[in-house]
Image (cartoon, coloured by chain):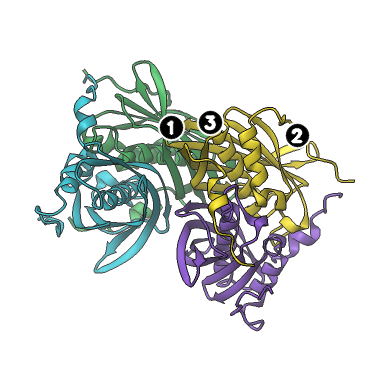
Chain colours: A purple, B yellow, C green, D cyan
Amino acid sequence: MKTKIRSAVSAATYPHVRDSFARQGLMSHLGAELSALSSGECEIRVRYRTELTQQHGYFHAGVTASIADSASGYAAYSTMPADSSVLTVEYKINLVAPAEGDLLIARGRVLRSGRTLKICTADVFFVNGKQEILCATSLSTIMALPGQSDTSRSRSRPRPAK
Amino acid sequence: MKTKIRSAVSAATYPHVRDSFARQGLMSHLGAELSALSSGECEIRVRYRTELTQQHGYFHAGVTASIADSASGYAAYSTMPADSSVLTVEYKINLVAPAEGDLLIARGRVLRSGRTLKICTADVFFVNGKQEILCATSLSTIMALPGQSDTSRSRSRPRPAK
Amino acid sequence: MKTKIRSAVSAATYPHVRDSFARQGLMSHLGAELSALSSGECEIRVRYRTELTQQHGYFHAGVTASIADSASGYAAYSTMPADSSVLTVEYKINLVAPAEGDLLIARGRVLRSGRTLKICTADVFFVNGKQEILCATSLSTIMALPGQSDTSRSRSRPRPAK
Amino acid sequence: MKTKIRSAVSAATYPHVRDSFARQGLMSHLGAELSALSSGECEIRVRYRTELTQQHGYFHAGVTASIADSASGYAAYSTMPADSSVLTVEYKINLVAPAEGDLLIARGRVLRSGRTLKICTADVFFVNGKQEILCATSLSTIMALPGQSDTSRSRSRPRPAK
């Protein structure tokens, strides 16, 4: 039986962050869940599946980086008003150990909050039994877009013909 | 009708690279295909699906980064013998434009090939009609593992209990 | 006899860039010269001295990075009006070979010019006889500060007591 | 009167690190001092001088990055035997605030110590009165060269003709 990843994110807090996360098709496709959220901090978890692997059977760096990126972006977005939006400008990630285990946890936090740019870090851990082991660390630059609704572009965007 | 992405990768060339790519569960899960391969160069393509989006409906940076990372790693691996393996040490990616459009193309190449480390760059383009527009550029450090079969760890690795 | 580094930068072009470069105390302290400049491109050169070395006697990565950073910033600034200013948000640099030789050349260019952010790359070469050999490559995010004079802060800034 | 930067580095500990630092011509040229050293950690300080500035009169990012790079490299080297050497493969640095003030302090530490690669972080602070304010953070990949004396190349390297 697949149990739900622990969710500490109450539906009553940071609704703009939870709504935005829910619109990220990739997070759902990877099976990622928003597991903790506070002002300037965000945690995302994803369980191991063979759909998420690189060639050796570990989690693919793309999964590690995807949840590190979203955790960083939503850490920043949690400090911003609902009528704003965020975009990742760039990030760097060091993959310090192969991402083994059956659970991956990314914890993002805002390191420096400027008016236009938010600098964030994220650490990613794999869980081996009960132990959390660091497998990646990232450093990101996030752009704040005040007054730009987080949904506006997706509505106006022409959907590609299928 | 969904047509297959153009594949210029003959089954007869670089079999170790194609085998390794085929073992990356994530590439298949994203719908990514290895579309071109030569010594020190690799191209990966992925079609737009709502499963691959961020909150505004664009391709998620995680998709962009995943194919940039795999294209860089396989550019490096194409220059190496079959009884070796590669691991990504780190990369940095700048997302220079929102990844719109119905097709994303990552082109990786080896910039500098050391004995232990391969430095690679990748450019990622989205296709808007017939035009390719740069949406990301990355700079990676790949570690060469000579004499380590690309499959050895996946066989010995204990599968997590489901 | 120490000959002057070739300077292709006419006093008549891009005066705001040349003035700003001249105010960078570090460039002068390193013996660096602005050797070429065009719209979106900038070249900086520095000659070998033992004052610029790391422990093995090569150019210190800090010198390589300093001229890569200034070349990137001034490539961006060359595309902007005189009543503006630039600040480096972040960069990543790969040092792909030891920086040997008696001359180091950084060539920066704007990869993508947004309203607020300019994404730049720089390649750094050392000259070995007549051959230029790549020793570093960088990827930078530069912030444009329109309407902020490049000298305003230096005038208002309280000088530290000596 | 210019007072000496506090030095907590006894001549009796980590002599291979102190010797290597002393051979870095650039550190001396910048006026940088090795101010603290323990296993896996290194601190470097530099006082403000107009020779170290960018165009606005702040410390140049090249100075910030130079001491962050050396602090990271020597944090790694402090964990290694004397008959070895280190080289910086790459780093990324975010400049989160203008580097004002009359003193800059870089604190590097080893985040992950592999056999071949050491992943290090450094934070750089400027001192404003008695307060330390974060102005930069970096993430580096350092290569360990076991059995390669830290001085061997500088002896064999042909000095450029002056």
Q: Say what amino acid the circle numbered 3 marks.
A: Pro
Marks 3 and 1: which is nearer the front? Answer: 3
Q: How far apart are the alpha carbons under marks 3 and 1?
A: 14 Å
Q: Say what amino acid the circle numbered 2 marks.
A: Ser
Asked if labels 3 and 2 touch by Cβ distance under 8 angstroms, the answer is no
Q: Would residue B131 appear left or right of A67 to someone viewing this image?
A: right
> Looking at the image, can residue A146 be seen?
yes
User: Count of labels shown?
Assistant: 3
Asked if labels 1 and 3 touch by Cβ distance under 8 angstroms, the answer is no
Provide the secondary structure element on which disc 1 rests.
loop
Mark toward the start of the polypeptide (1 vs 2) = 2
Q: Chain of mark 2?
A: B
Q: In the rendering, at what x and y percent does residue C43 appear?
A: 43, 30
Q: Which residue is mark 3?
A: B81
Q: In the rendering, at what x and y percent does residue C97 appear?
A: 38, 32
Residue at point 65%, 39% (across, down):
B19
Question: Which residue lies most toward the top here?
Answer: C130
Q: Residues within 10 Å of mark 1 (few under 14, many from 20)?
A: few
Q: How far apart are the alpha carbons under marks 1 and 2?
A: 29 Å
Q: Residues within 10 Å of mark 2 (few under 14, many from 20)?
A: some
Q: Say what amino acid the circle numbered 1 marks.
A: Gly
Q: Would residue C142 appear left or right of A48 to someone viewing this image?
A: left
Q: In the rendering, at what x and y percent does residue B105 appear?
A: 69, 40
- Is residue A80 placed above or below B45 in the rendered structure? below
Q: Which residue is mark 2?
A: B7
Q: In the rendering, at what x and y percent does residue D90 appear?
A: 41, 43
